[in-house]
Image (cartoon, rainbow, N blue to C red):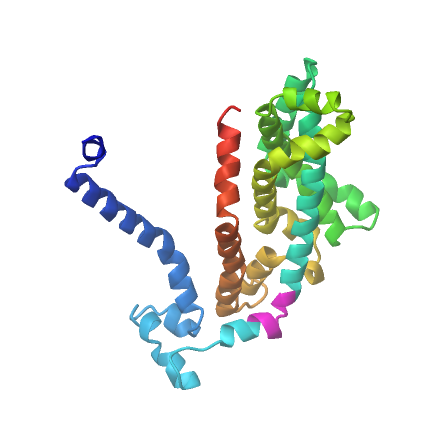
Amino acid sequence: MASKAQEKPLGLRILLTVFLVVWLIAAAFPFMWTLWGSFKVELDFFSISNWRDALTGPRTEFTYGHPFTGAGYAGAWIQEEFWRSVINTFIVCFFVVCISLTLGTLGGYALSRSGHNYVFWLLITALIFRALPPITLVSGYLPPFFEWNIWGYLPTAIIVLVAINQPFTLWMLHSFFQKIPKELDESAKVDGCTQFQAFRHVIIPVMWPGVITTGLFSFLLAYNDFAVTAMLLSESNRTMIPAVAAFLGTTQTEGNVMFAVAAVVSATVPLFIMVMFFQRQIVSGLTAGAVKG
């Protein structure tokens, strides 16, 4: 009887199902449309006379003998060497995540276990800096980078991205550490552990969902960044997002739109794979940060 009482009315279930299907279609449509169009020529995908050309691909078939072509991917990856941008992106993301998590974990743990009043003001100051637009912070780095002749290199962008990302990492990890009872530290010290040993062997294993969640958001910040990497990296050291913008061209240079479309799909696929792979850790990490332990 209790299970029947808890069942939703049939009309409500149908409404929720329809809403979920419509929402999934609306959310997935832009990517699926871009993925489909990446195998067409520009005149088909951006046809003004007939939008159905993007589905059937008559000009693509006339040019390549088939309604689908990988010319956009070949042009982006081989002709324009998009693979270099992919490697640069993952180098930047790897070091940004490692440095941000190292500093954020140590700092968040120290602040969560500190009883001083300055902790609150330090976190508020970090939040203010995180709220500032990244472009306003980048402009302050440019003069010394030009003077020291270190502009255009990957370590330069990594340093700035870590500096911009650190307040968010500190805030998020601090909130996770606060949910862990201090009695765990005290129990570890009673067993003979030092403060760092208690942190390493007792607290960190409990913190893994929060660390993974914070690391994921740090990765996304570096992966999707445009303002910092576009201003601080030279053409040979571009990451993926500035490279996609470069494929579109400017008023002075001619671009190739289909190269950009293929590059957008190439840059989006790893994000889908990563989120699907880490979905359990993301959910458990967000839940651990939201529920008081």
In magenta segment, residue 82? yes
From the top left corner, tell me how far across and down residue 98 is, in percent. 70, 45
* Res 53 quadrant in image: bottom left
* Residue drawn 68% across the image and 14% down it: 115
Give 280 or 95, whichever is nearer the viewer.
280
Provide the major secondary structure of the magenta segment.
helix
The image shows residue 27, relative to residue 171, as above or below, that is below
* Residue drawn 41% across the image and 77% down it: 68
* Residue drawn 56% across the image and 68% down it: 254
Regarding residue 250, the answer to whether it shows in the image is no
Q: Residue furthest right?
A: 148
Please give left or right for residue 133 compared with residue 272 in the image.
Answer: right
From the top left corner, tell me how far across and down residue 230 is, in percent. 64, 52
From the top left corner, tell me how far across and down residue 183 is, in percent. 64, 19
Q: Residue furthest front?
A: 191
* Residue drawn 57% across the image and 42% down it: 217
* Res 216 quadrant in image: top right
In magenta segment, residue 118? no
From the top left corner, tell me how far across and down residue 269 is, in percent. 50, 59
From which residue to which does the magenta span run? Answer: 76-83
Please give left or right for residue 53 compared with residue 102 in the image.
Answer: left
Please give left or right for residue 27 compared with residue 251 in the image.
Answer: left
